[in-house]
Amino acid sequence: MSDNFDSALTYTSYLAVDELLSLQRPLSVGPEHDEMLFIIIHQTYELWFKQIIHEFLQAQRAMESGDTHYSLAILGRIRTIMKVCVTQIDILETMTPLQFNAFRSYLSSSSGFQSAQFRKVEALLGRRDNKMAGHLPLDIQAEIAVITSANSVWDSALAYLAQRGHAIPTDVLNRDRSVAYEANLAVQDVLLEVHRQDPESAGVCERLLDIDEGIQEWRYRHVKMVERTIGHKMGSGGSSGVEYLSSTLFNPVFKDLWEIRSRF
């Protein structure tokens, strides 16, 4: 009987370290010292986005199956990852505007606005509009369309609460998933009762609020980092830079959870 042990496996081969370390390819002449930091920070973000997608999908499965404790664990992990994403901005801010502008022209039309994985994160969180993916390749648009036709994380949370016996309105549970969820007073009434009568379910809701707050924190820090680095110049790839990023601030994902705060 084989125990599937590979005696040839090493740390380097398991983690594909050689391939990983070959993926940093500065374009500037020299190259400019700070371009390496810029590349590694953004590659790391893409790895974290991949993990966040992985965790959100598992959190949805856990909630939809009614597994409270596993849901709490996975949602808590996502919040911790978000804290790391915020902290990485501290590292990026050690680069001055002069240091960034020394290689910025080499970025050409590339822009963080083109991050397909972050658009997938937004789709999982319930964003539903034509602007979110229209600039991406057709195959990525198709992948995002699959996400936007299925349950968002909030839909999974509502399904979880319904399984726990809470009276989530039927029209909300059966709504068109391709349309963005709107704050709902009847759902908010149920959420108040959840917090008063069902501590376990309330814990899941508070984990979701933690994540929402973490996303807003990351967006704010990202905006200020961009403003600190390029001011109000046009962003890379022709985006409006700070102006666009600022428009994303203070837009909560789980609106009902915020609305009930003034009703306790």
Image (cartoon, rainbow, N blue to C red):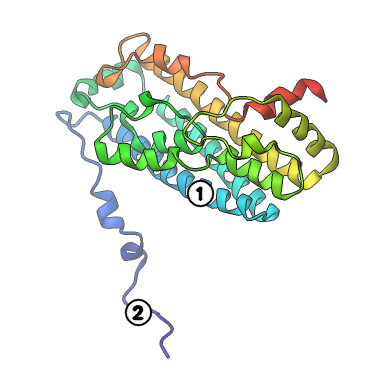
Tell me which label, 1 or 2, sits earlier in the chain.
2
Q: In the displayed orientation, state which residue is furthest to the right.
A: 197
Q: Nearer the viewer, residue 32 or 135?
A: 135
**Compared to 1, does 26 lie above or below?**
above
Q: Name the amino acid type tagged 1.
A: Leu
What is the x, y in percent for residue 95? 37, 24
What is the x, y in percent for residue 72? 66, 49
Q: Nearer the viewer, residue 231 or 248?
A: 248
The residue lying at 59 percent from left, 31 percent from top is 212
Q: Report helix, strand or loop for mark 1.
A: helix
Q: Nearer the viewer, residue 14 or 257?
A: 257
Q: Residues within 10 Å of mark 1 (few under 14, many from 20)?
A: some
Distance of label 1 from label 2 (alpha carbons): 33 Å
The nearer-to-camera label among 1 and 2 is 1
The image quadrant of residue 155 is top right
The residue lying at 17 percent from left, 29 percent from top is 28
Mark 1 sits on what residue? 57
The residue lying at 77 percent from left, 29 percent from top is 189
What is the x, y in percent for residue 34? 29, 29
**Compared to 232, does 42 lie above or below?**
below
Q: Nearer the viewer, residue 42 or 262?
A: 262
Q: Name the amino acid type tagged 2.
A: Ser
**Compared to 163, does 30 lie above or below?**
above
Mark 2 sits on what residue? 7
Locate the N terminus and report the quarter of the image it occupies: bottom left
The residue lying at 63 percent from left, 35 percent from top is 171
Residue 137: mark: none
The reply to whether residue 185 is visible in this rendering is: yes
